[in-house]
Amino acid sequence: MTSSSSPHPDSNWQRGFWCLIGTQFQGAFSDNVLKWLVIYLVIAQKLPKEQLDGLVSDSGMYFAIPFLLLSMVGGWMADRFSKRHVMIGVKTMELGIMVFATYALGSGRIALQLVSICLMGVHSAFFAASKYGSLPEVVPLKKLSWANGIMEMLTFLAVILGTLTAALLAQSFADKPAWSGGILLALAMVGWLMSLGITRLPAASPGKPFRPNFLGDLWREFRWMRTDRDLWRANLGNTGFFFIAVLLQMNLVLYAEQVMHIEAMENSALQVALALGMAAGSLLAGKLSGDHVEYGLIPLGAFLMAAMSFALGCAGISKGLFTVCLALLGIGGGIYIVPLAAVLQHRPPADRRGAVQGAAAWLSWVGICGAALLQKEMNIRLQWTPGNIFWFCGACAVIGGSYALLSRPAALPALLNRWKHGRLNLDDGSA
């Protein structure tokens, strides 16, 4: 099963694409600045270990809950209305959210700051389906893997800069954090202006009815997706990726605080190494995929993630080697996720692409919530060390890579054969 026809991008698609990328970059950057700013402000209070572990987990949960409740609504909006109009509306909503975040930061009340993170989760839940669903309509089909590589690369660069910026703001405005909110409000205005340049797109399914029972709608999408083996497997792989990635990221914060005993700026530098690797891996995956979806990259990326996760869990690892392993782990993650994202965008028909993206986002946030809950259990109840949790992440990546390898046993050998003969852009077993 492959996608049906969709609006064919014209020869001037680049302007709309780069406006979409710029809008996405700003949103991802602001998400990460706000989330990590709150975390760093919490860490600065030198709370007891158990309370700190709980608040780090809660920050992830507050951002994830809106995706569980609203991803299918975001998918319906992406099909029912012009995806461009949805994205502009969401960026307008962000302006109000950042006004509230400014007040929350200025008040110093952790509860309100967590609510502001939750509101940004609402923003991103509505934005996600239109963002990913619009790519096949904005860029030519042969550029889809490349476009996904660019989007994922710049998203992880936004994570890098957002993490660093959050640490800088936490230190620079420690006594007046409302200034940080004012900066985020200004950035939200920039994102809104960029969204106006996104390619004009017609509604894919203007008569699509709204179903308030999102669980029933979700179940219908799952049943439909299971008729397409590759699409369903891509959903499972996407969910597994976000489960591992979020568990790794939360564990990294606690490892830096409890094992390395380093300050916020050094902590953020480790997050940067991971995100920089993800950016490089995403760009590399887009390049290696050429003009098709390269399934052979999926197990390759998973096994690299696994190897580096096991290395991170080793006792006595030096800070320099730890940082290198983080970057390599990120490269594996980028190589893994880009082909999966391309499958999720390419295979659904145009009139239900938004619903599929909404369902995929819902599943990915189930993985994220699962990671947040499990991190809390492993740290507080099971008393696992951060090293043990890194090893657990490695084992999960091995399972994911093995499943991908068994699902398409010819994909990785075909990729390696093309590498051997220098024919990376030939289509063999593509979508």
Image (tube, rainbow, N blue to C red):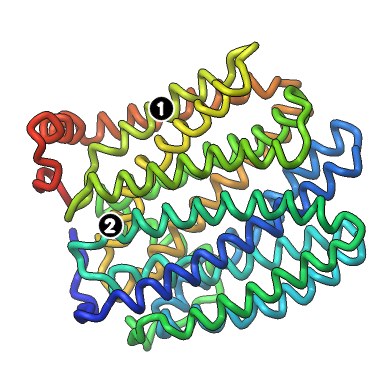
Residue at 29% across / 50% down in the picture?
A: 286
Q: Nearer the viewer, mark 1 or mark 2?
A: 2
Q: Is residue 20 above or below residue 47?
A: below
Place residue 26 in its image quadrant. bottom right
Q: Secondary structure at mark 1?
A: helix
Q: Residue at x 70, y 69 (%)?
A: 184
Q: Horizontal and vertical percent for residue 114?
A: 78, 58
- The three-letter amino acid code for the residue at tag 2 is Trp
The percent coordinates of residue 106 (x first, y second) are 89, 66
Q: Dots 1 and 2: beta carbons under 8 Å?
A: no
In the displayed structure, does residue 343 sit left or right of residue 2?
Answer: right
Give the residue at x 71% y 62%: 118
Residue 240 seen in render: no
Q: Nearer the viewer, residue 63 or 259?
A: 259
3D distance between C-alphas at marks 1 and 2: 27 Å
Residue 83, placed above or below residue 121: below
Q: Which x, y percent locates residue 13?
A: 27, 77
Q: Which mark is residue 399?
A: 1
On the rendered image, what quadrant is the N terminus found in?
bottom left
Is residue 18 at all visible to an observer of this figure? Answer: yes
Identify the disc placed on residue 27: none
Residue underneath mark 2: 146
